[in-house]
Image (tube, grey):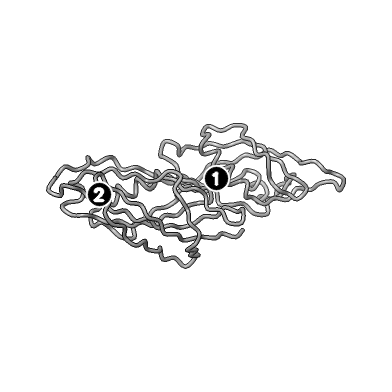
C-alpha cells in the first residue's frame, strides 16, 4: 500500500494577553516527506496552551513543533523543532498538541497521513510576574498494535472465506486507562470489485477507539471468492485484537 506523507506549515499564536508577530514556519526535515505548499490543512480541534506570565521567565518565547498525523486526522507524534529554552514550557506545548486533532488531509478522494509544523508565540503584559502554572503529573501516552484475527489465521496457513491482500497500519495512541487487553467484533460487506463497505460495530469495550480502527479498516484490501452469477454484496464478520501495549 502506498504510504504518502505531506509536510505542511501552520501558524497559531498562543498568549494569555496578546499576540504580536508571527514567525515563519519551519519545515520538518525528513526524507519521506512530500512538501505541498498549496495543500493547506486545518485544525478540527486546535491546541490550547494555558500559561502564566512567570512561565516565560522574563521575555517572549517561541516554540515550533513537528506533528505527525494519520489519515484520520489523529496526532501520532509531536517533536520540538525550536525550543523555547524552557523545558516546562516546551512540555506544555507538546501536551496541548497531543490533545488536539486535525481535519483529515484528502487528495483526489483519498485521505493521507501527513506531517505539519506548528509555531507558537508566547507574550505577556507583565514580565516581572513570577506566577507560574503549577506542575502537573506527566501525561502518559500509550500505543498499541491492532491486528485482524483473520490475518493471523491467514498467516498461519488456515483457510479463510476471504484473503487479505493489504492491511493498513493499525497503531493508535491512547491513554494509560484505555490501554488494556480487548478485542473488537464487527461485520462488513464486500461488493463484486472487493470494495469494503457497510462496516458495523458488533461489540467493543471502547467505542471511540473502535470507531477509529474501523475507519482504518476501510482501507484494507481483500479478495473474496464469488460465483460468476452473484450480484449482491457478501457479508463477513471479523475481530480486531489489541496487542503490544507500550506507554511512555
Q: On screen, 53 above or below 60?
A: above
Residue 186 higher or lower than 247, as above or below: above
Residue at numbered disc 2? 88
The CA span between labels 1 and 2 is 33 Å
Query: Does dot 2 land on a helix, a strand or a loop?
Result: helix
Q: What element carries label 1?
A: strand
Question: Neighbour class for label 1 at 10 Å: few (<14), some, many (≥20)?
Answer: many
What is the x, y in percent for residue 172? Answer: 49, 46
Labels in figure, total = 2
Label number found at residue 238:
none
Residue plotted at (76% across, 41% down)? 234
Which residue is the site of mark 1? Answer: 146
Q: Along the horizontal axis of the image, is 5 left or right of 23?
A: right
Residue drawn 71% across the image and 41% down it = 189
Report the side of 200 relative to 18 (left or right).
right
Q: Which of marks 1 and 2 is nearer the N terminus?
A: 2
Q: Position of residue 220 (x, y in %)?
A: 64, 50
Amino acid at each position: 500500500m502506498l504510504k504518502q506523507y505531506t509536510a505542511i506549515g501552520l501558524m497559531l499564536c498562543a498568549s494569555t494577553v496578546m499576540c504580536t508577530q508571527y514567525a515563519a514556519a519551519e519545515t520538518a526535515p525528513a526524507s519521506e516527506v512530500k512538501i505541498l505548499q498549496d495543500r493547506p490543512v486545518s485544525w478540527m480541534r486546535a491546541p490550547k496552551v494555558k500559561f502564566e506570565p512567570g512561565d516565560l521567565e522574563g521575555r517572549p518565547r517561541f516554540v515550533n513543533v513537528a506533528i505527525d498525523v494519520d489519515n484520520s486526522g489523529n496526532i501520532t507524534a509531536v517533536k520540538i523543532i525550536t525550543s523555547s529554552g524552557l523545558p516546562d514550557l516546551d512540555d506544555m506545548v507538546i501536551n496541548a498538541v497531543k490533545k488536539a486533532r486535525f481535519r483529515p488531509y484528502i487528495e483526489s478522494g483519498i485521505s493521507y497521513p501527513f506531517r505539519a509544523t506548528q509555531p507558537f508565540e508566547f507574550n505577556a503584559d507583565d514580565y516581572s510576574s513570577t506566577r507560574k502554572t503549577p506542575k502537573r503529573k506527566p501525561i502518559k501516552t500509550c500505543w498499541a498494535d491492532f491486528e485482524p484475527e483473520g490475518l493471523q489465521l491467514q498467516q498461519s496457513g488456515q483457510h479463510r472465506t476471504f484473503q487479505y491482500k493489504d492491511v493498513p497500519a493499525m497503531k493508535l495512541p491512547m491513554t494509560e486507562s484505555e490501554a488494556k487487553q480487548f478485542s473488537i467484533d464487527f461485520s462488513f460487506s464486500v461488493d463484486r470489485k472487493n470494495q469494503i463497505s457497510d462496516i458495523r460495530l458488533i461489540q467493543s469495550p471502547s467505542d471511540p477507539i473502535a470507531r477509529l480502527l474501523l475507519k482504518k479498516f476501510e482501507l484494507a484490501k481483500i479478495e473474496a471468492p464469488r460465483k460468476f452469477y452473484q450480484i449482491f454484496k457478501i457479508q463477513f464478520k471479523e475481530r480486531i485484537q489489541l496487542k503490544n501495549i507500550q506507554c511512555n
